Amino acid sequence: MKRIYYKIAISFTVLIMLGACKKDYLNTYPTNGVAQASAFTTTSNALMALNGIHRSLYTQYSNQDEGGQSTIAIDLDCLGEDYVFTGLGSSWFKATSQWTSHRNVNSSLVYYVYRFYYKIIANANMIINNIDGATGTDDKKNIKGQALAYRAWAHFNLVQLFAKRYSAAGKPNTQMGVPIMLTNVTTGIGRSSVEDVYTQINADLDASIGLLGSVAKRSNRSQISVNVAQGIKARVALTQQDWANASKYAILARSGYVNETAPVLMTAADYQKGFNDYKNSEWMWGSHVQADQTQYFYSFFAYISENYGSSDIKGNPKAINSLLYNTISATDVRNKLWDPTATLYTPPASGSRMPYMNIKFLVPDITLSCGDFPLMRASEMYLIEAEAKAQSGDNAGAATALYTMAVVRDPSYVKSVKTGQALIDEILLQRRVELWGEGFRFLDLKRLNVALNRNGANHISTYAVIYDVAPGDVKWQFLIPQTEINANPAIAGQQNPLQ
Amino acid sequence: MRKSLLTLLLVLLAITNMAFAQERVVTGTVTQKSDGASIPGATISVKGTRTATVTNQNGKFSIKVSSPNAVLVVSFVGMVKTEITVGNQYTVDVAMVSEVTSLDEVIVVAYGTSKKSEFTGAAVSVGSKKLTLSPITNITKALDGIAPGVQVTSASGQPGSGPDIRIRGFGSVQYSGAPLIVVDNVPFSGTLANINPDDIESVTILKDAASTALYGNQAANGVVVVTTKKGNKDRSQIQVKIAQGLSTRAVQEYERVSRDNYYPLMWESYRNSMVNDPKIPLPANIAAQIASGVYPLTAGVQSYNGKTYNSIKQNLGMNPYNVADNAIVGIDGKLNPAAKFLYPNDLGWEKGLSRIGKRGDYGVSFSGGGPKSDYFVSMGYVNEKGFVIKSDYERVTGRININANPISWFKTGLNLSGTVTTSNVANDATSTGYANPFFFSRNIGPIYPIYRHNTNGDFLWDGNGNQQYDLGGARPVNPGRNIIAETEFNDNLFKRNAWTGKTYGEITITKDLKFTTNVSAEIGNYDASTLDNKIVGDGAPGGRASKTTTLSTTININQLINYNKAFGKHSIEAMAGHESYIYNYLYGFRTGQIADGNTELINFTTTSSLNSYTDNYRKEGYFGQVTYNYENRFYAKASFRHDGSSKFAAPVRWGNFGAVSAGWRLDQEPFIKSIKEIDGLKLRASYGTVGSDNELDYYAYQALYALGFNNAVEPGILQSSLGNLDIQWETNTNFDLGVDFALFKRVTGTFDYYNRQSKNLLFQVNLPLSSGVLIQNRNVGTMANSGFEFEANTQIIKKTDFKWNIDLNLSTVKNAFKKLPFVEQVNGTKKYMVGHSIYDYWLRESMGVDPADGSAIYRAANFIVASSKVIGKDTVTTDPNNARYHYAGSAIPDLYGSVSSNFSYKNFDLSIAFSFQLGGEIYDNNYAALMSPGTYGSALSIDMLNRWQKPGDITNVPRLDAGRVAQFGATSDRWLTSGTYFNFKTINLGYNLPLNVVKRLQMQNVRLYLSGDNLWLKSSRTGLNPTQAFTGVTSNAYVPARVVTVGINVTL
């Protein structure tokens, strides 16, 4: 009988040695993430959350044509008339350029664009709504000011794409805008009016400019400074046809520098270096993509550059509208950014040469798709100032602002003596040439309420398909993605017109 | 390695062999009890020794024994093993009973074994002989058709790969629904490819809650219990196996149009696109001229009304004929009769990627034992080269299973296994990726060459006298790519080492009370390495390489207390267990290759990505079970399990699950006993619940910010999940009603009805995109699976030297949502809605082709003047955005099953097996791509020859129109085809050398065989692989392999 007790004793010993679990045995934590609760306990953590937003502008999302803000820029140029497909290459962006993607509720484009900007808004809201309770020595004004600028910038992009254009003559703009997200809720909210969205955008920008005004020098140009916030404000005002503020903030944005050197328009030599370095003297805001944060085939440069060896570039080098190119003077440095004869530049191995293909964008290292992406340049500020002044009747001021920029591009440029619409047209033509490929054209067409017209240029009917879209057509509005409508009961019945 | 194994073996033999004196010879005859026929080839061994013999042609044997206490063990396939104590006899005659007429088969169940007659759950056990009928590398392949209720996809042809398995329908919506794998009593987290099929003694499929409840967490989708071999205490033997096979593709390629049809068809497509342009239609004659390239040029381009038009040659990029670019296709749409194809022998993309695959499979095992121990030691080596280049698999496996009983009250064992695998993997991860050989070769138009040619069509040679790959700069499809070159130059390989160590101790405290502890460690290293070459493809021009290293460590400890009291055969068991899982991940990616031929990261200049992390996953469970048996007539069992998982928040972390079951042996009741025809009859029923945290993120309840969002060098984090403190166990409620029967001394079978409800489904609920986070894990919804299962094994002829069996199994599955968090949710080609199944198609309703203009038409949702019209009573539309969607059938078959048959005549045996499925629909994506009405450069299905061409044509293929690819080719029920198929799965013809020959060679058995796998498939379309995925949607994946093997198995 005693043996039984020994055996029980052995069994229990084993049981206790192997079997005793600590109470926290089932508490495990990830090593590739941090708890949300600890993200805003200190300002240094909150600063990391802000840097995450900067990074989200150039990270990979679901599909290969979803590489952050830069691929949206490609989409917006594809919807215009100045960005020409020369072949098929791959079929990336083909449906966008044929005006079908943004009009399909199930397309990855509308899903991506919508989700991308609201993700930025949600992350900005986390900062805006939690930073005040954080402890630490980092500048809370800097962190909160940048988050407010991002929230405004993202709402601004959304309302331009998903709503009817803002019309200064049509105040208040009661047409449906987009949901204004100021706190993060999962139950969904409905669309506010375009007027209300712009009111919120301006409120956020004013708050941002107020906070960032006292911030010491930013760490680099991927961060939003007070001048960048002013530049966004200038864009917003231009879109609202608020010419006085557009001009005022454009000037402030390029010249009102306290803690850092004001931007200087780049030289002709710098202009031909491939648009891939945010240290360029006139870049005000840009994403810096370093080699170990590369986006592979998601990268902007994997579609638009002249020299990276992606299938899309090999089969479909991107060209400028030949009619637009032919307006560029031979002495203009921008004349050299495109090759009308398809003989000047060497494409990647087994790639095609096509007339009017661009070398504006180049990767610095042909084995890597990475390059920096410009989010705001000083020349745009001159163009905004010129356009706003011309629109408000200040022909002389407009011509001077335009001249300041244009003469750096073309030493032979003569200051314009045009007035009224003719001057406005000249400014807009300069704008098309200067900002080619940087994602402005669709928004400009919509803002200006003019038709899409691809006729008479080097577009090939097989790829272009759509040649004309009249101003005011329902197709100028992106459709709200079906996923949003399915999950957000408040937005049901608020879809944009389908036909 | 082999030397050390032999040393080990010798040591073991020394322990187990004992010399005895007093030898004498016993003789006898082995017969079959039912008809008295003698049984040749039966094995007679002396228990606890190596002494063994087999009966001769007349069933007679003689054997030396050394003591009157010696016990003879007589065994023969299909017969119940019989033991006889020799005593003083010199002649021992043995009458054996056929196994099939009894329900007394012993099956492996959760943490133990059970007699089938006493088992109250639904489970199927399959022995090694049936599992290894066709030579396989991955045991999961053997599960196709092996038991009712088990549904299996067709295995990819990638060497070493295995199919997906579902047991009794589909238990999860967004997660895999794969069953739990248990190997030798321990949940197994690795891949079954790491286990040598020759080491496996049996596989048991546990289907209902009564069978699976003891595995609690993870067992919601059924359990596959794998038991490895152990030595026989009464027989020691050495087995050697050598098999050699050849493989080819088992499913033929889709039929596509030939090269000389291609240019005219694409011309027609282009011409039609201009004539039918909705905005700017061109006159037919102008369009024909433009398409042919003969329209007058303005400034070097064909310009009409201010718009620039390509010729068909410009659209297709290449002119493979010996005529001018604008003279390939005439304005009549016909190929120029003078055009001669320049390189007809250089179009074999598929051939260039294929080869005759080879498979070598070699194994040796030693097994045996003595009174106090048994052992099984094996080594295996498989070298498989797939039928696609750069796809192969090499695996070395070793296993040592030892059990010892050194003290009467203590039992222990050690189970060690190691697997070393190296494999090149065909790049089919992305269905439409440029680097996917199946996508590329299937869809490239039949005019594009592999190699470069000059204008005469002659090959261009490089400086070394080699042909130069055409890199496709001129091609509109896959520009700048060449799949043959890329496959040849790139590497996509992995090395995997898996080590499993397991030990247990069992203490018998009293006769009734037992304490057992199992400790196991599973360690897996996975090392993947890719090289994208710098000449062509994704890596060009710099070259790039990546390395992924993962280490997973699973520790599993369980303690079982087992009380089995003899009074009235009541038994009580109680157990407890822990599991933990740690996963380390490291990934590095660099670009810019320095020297050729070196794929180590140090040979690359720029780091493009580098990161690592560790995951921890832990589970804990306590469980108990009580079984009750009344006079071997009534059986009842109740089990309970208390489970915790680290995936849930502390307050809701623990779940309680349990099952009850009962069985009634009707055959033991007098009123049945009197019916001669019934040999066995049992009714059983079970009901229970099991929990699941399957495949949920490891930290599912936590709201997290993700690391890895640094902004250049500034540290950054981004919101990644909202978390949900309320999520808890998904619960599967299982009801099963079954009958087991044995009739006419020939037929045994089982019939089951099951109803399985998955409640609190773990669902990734879509959030409004405007919330900034895409999904949140929530417990919502209920899904039901129910169905019938039938299995029958019939011995048609059971003479001693001629046997013929037929096994049949049939299953049905009905799947339906009972509760959902939304009214409906469209998910790809499916729509989730209460009352519909997870795999019900929700598609546009195709209405065929408008005979007037050849447009693809769909049933219209609304009448819209521009795009709708009324044909007969139907309102149809050409605009897919206005098409009406409808439920268009289901991917789930009405019935699936298998038939197998075994014949044996004298020394020959033949086994064949078929699997089949009736009903169910396949959405054939691959076919839809080939039916695209004019994607320049893409291959076209042969069915394109039936396209609409002129008004009045009645056909189901719309006109070719490159401008309407999206409209005509839209996702619709036009791409559904019947999932019914019939597959001649395996054949195995064997010959056992005559006993006298074998004996002369001093061997126990020599078997030669010829086997074939995947020999013939009949489905609704050539090229279609109907069982590629449970979703029913086809993709460009590695086609299953047909393997023909010759082999020899020798038992010493």
Image (tube, coloured by chain):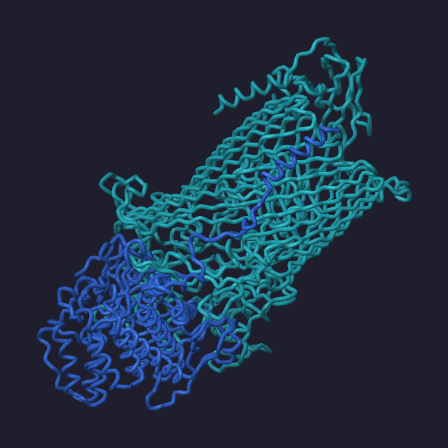
**Image coordinates for residue A81, horizontal then vertical, percent:** 29, 74
Farthest top residue?
Answer: B22
Q: Nearer the viewer, residue B221 or A16?
A: A16
| Count of numbered marks | 0
Q: Quadrant of residue A33?
A: bottom left
Letter of the chain shown cyan in the rendering:
B
Q: The chain coloured blue carries which letter?
A: A
Indicate the position of residue A191 as horizontal and vertical percent values.
45, 80
Q: Quadrant of the C terminus of chain A?
A: bottom left
Horizontal arrangement in the rendering, residue B551 relative to residue B1019 (left or right): left
Indicate the position of residue B247 as horizontal and vertical percent values: 50, 39
Residue A308 quadrant: bottom left
Image quadrant where residue A392 sits: bottom left
- B442 relative to B227, above or below: below
**A346, B138: nearer the viewer:** B138
When the figure is inspected, residue A140 is found, relative to residue B994, above or below; the finding is: below
Above or below for B588 versus A317: above
Query: Residue A196's spot in the image, x, y percent?
Result: 40, 84
Task: Say whether residue A367 is left or right of residue B985.
Answer: left
A4 or B414: nearer the viewer? A4
- The foreground one among A460 and B492 is B492
- On the question of residue B964 being in view, the answer is no
